[in-house]
C-alpha cells in the first residue's frame, strides 16, 4: 500500500496493519467527505466530538514535551501543542459558530465513548511508557489525516461541501507538519532503538500501539456516521 512519504517509521507501522489502515483511511465517512455526500448532521456531530478530542490530544502532546529527551523533540512537541490549541481547533470553532454552536457549548459537550476510549488510550500509552510509546499511539492521527487530506484534495475542488476540512489537512502548512514530525520520529527511533528498529525487542509493542490507535480512528469515524 502506498501513500505520502512521512518517514520509514510510519511506513513500517502502516505496512504492519494494512487491513486496519485501509479501514481508517478509506472509511465511508472519508469517502463522504471527499465526494460531498456526507450528511451535514454527521459532519457536525463529528466536529463537536473532534473539538473535545483535540483538547485531550493537546494534553497528550504536552505529555510528549514532558517525555522528550532532546531539545529538538521538545521544540516540535511544544509547537504541536501550540498549533493544536490556537489553529486546528480554530477551524472547528469557526465551522460550528456558523451553525450556531458556541465555543463554550463545544467545550461542555458530552464525550462519546469512542472519543474517551481513543484519547485516554493515547494518554495512557504516554503515562505508562516512554516517548516512543506515546509517538506510536499519536502517529496514526498525525499522518493519517495528512494522507487522507492529500488524497481527497486530488479528487475534489475547494468549493466542495467539505473543501475547508480537506484543505486544512491537504495544505502545505499541514503537510510540512507531517514531514517535520516524521523526521523528528526518525531521529527519536534511531536514538532509542538504533539502526534496525524493526528488529528491536520493543518493535512489536510499538506496532501494537500504532495498530490499536488506527482501530480507534476507525471507531471514531463510525461514531461520526451515527450522528447522521
Ligand atoms: C479523530 C481525529 N484524528 C486525527 C485528527 C487530526 N489531528 C489531531 S491532532 C493533530 C495535530 C498533530 O497531532 C491532527 C492533525 C483529528 N483532528 N481527529
Image (cartoon, helix red, strand yellow):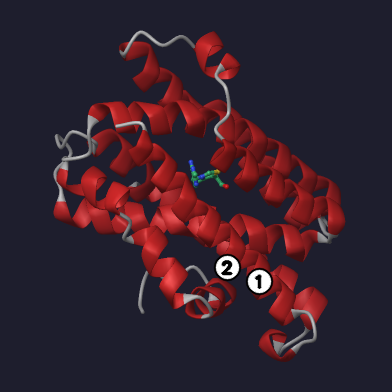
Residue identifier under label 1: 208
Foreground pick, 82 / 214: 214
Percent x, y for residue 17?
A: 50, 75
- Taking depth in this image into account, of 115 and 136 the one nearest to the observer is 115
Q: Residue at x 74, y 47 (%)?
A: 123
Disc 2 packing (10 Å; few <14; some 14–19; many ≥20):
many
- SS category of the residue bearing label 2: helix
For label 1, the SS is: helix
Q: Residue at x 48, y 80 (%)?
A: 15
Image quarter where the C terminus lies is: top left
* Residue 116, image x, y percentages: 63, 38
Task: For the N terminus, give its image quadrant.
Answer: bottom left
Q: Can residue 146 be seen in the rendering of this structure?
A: yes
Does the residue at mark 1 contact the one at mark 2 (Cβ under 8 Å)? yes
* Residue located 14% across and 43% down the image: 157
Is residue 175 rendered to the left or right of residue 79? left
The x and y percentages for residue 89 are 51, 28
Amino acid at each position: 500500500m502506498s501513500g505520502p512519504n512521512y518517514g520509514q517509521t510510519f511506513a513500517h507501522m502502516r505496512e504492519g496493519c494494512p487491513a486496519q489502515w485501509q479501514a481508517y483511511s478509506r472509511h465511508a465517512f472519508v469517502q463522504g467527505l471527499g465526494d460531498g455526500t456526507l450528511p451535514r448532521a454527521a459532519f457536525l456531530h463529528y466536529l463537536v466530538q473532534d473539538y473535545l478530542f483535540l483538547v485531550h490530544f493537546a494534553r497528550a502532546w504536552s505529555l510528549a514535551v514532558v517525555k522528550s529527551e532532546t531539545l529538538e523533540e521538545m521544540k516540535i512537541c511544544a509547537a504541536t501543542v501550540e498549533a493544536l490549541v490556537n489553529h486546528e481547533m480554530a477551524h472547528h470553532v469557526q465551522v460550528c459558530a456558523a451553525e450556531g454552536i458556541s465555543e463554550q457549548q463545544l467545550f461542555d459537550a458530552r464525550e462519546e465513548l469512542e472519543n474517551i476510549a481513543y484519547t485516554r488510550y493515547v494518554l495512557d500509552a504516554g503515562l505508562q511508557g516512554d516517548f516512543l510509546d506515546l509517538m506510536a499511539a499519536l502517529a496514526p492521527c498525525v499522518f493519517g489525516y495528512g494522507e487522507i487530506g492529500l488524497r481527497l484534495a486530488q479528487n475534489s475542488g475547494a468549493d466542495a461541501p467539505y473543501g475547508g476540512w480537506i484543505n486544512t489537512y491537504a495544505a502545505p502548512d499541514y503537510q510540512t507538519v507531517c514531514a517535520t514530525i516524521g523526521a523528528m520520529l526518525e531521529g527519536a527511533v534511531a536514538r532509542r532503538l538504533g539502526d534496525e528498529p524493526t528488529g528491536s525487542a520493543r518493535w512489536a509493542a510499538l506496532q501494537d500501539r500504532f495498530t490499536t490507535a488506527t482501530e480507534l480512528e476507525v471507531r471514531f469515524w463510525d461514531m461520526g456516521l451515527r450522528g447522521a
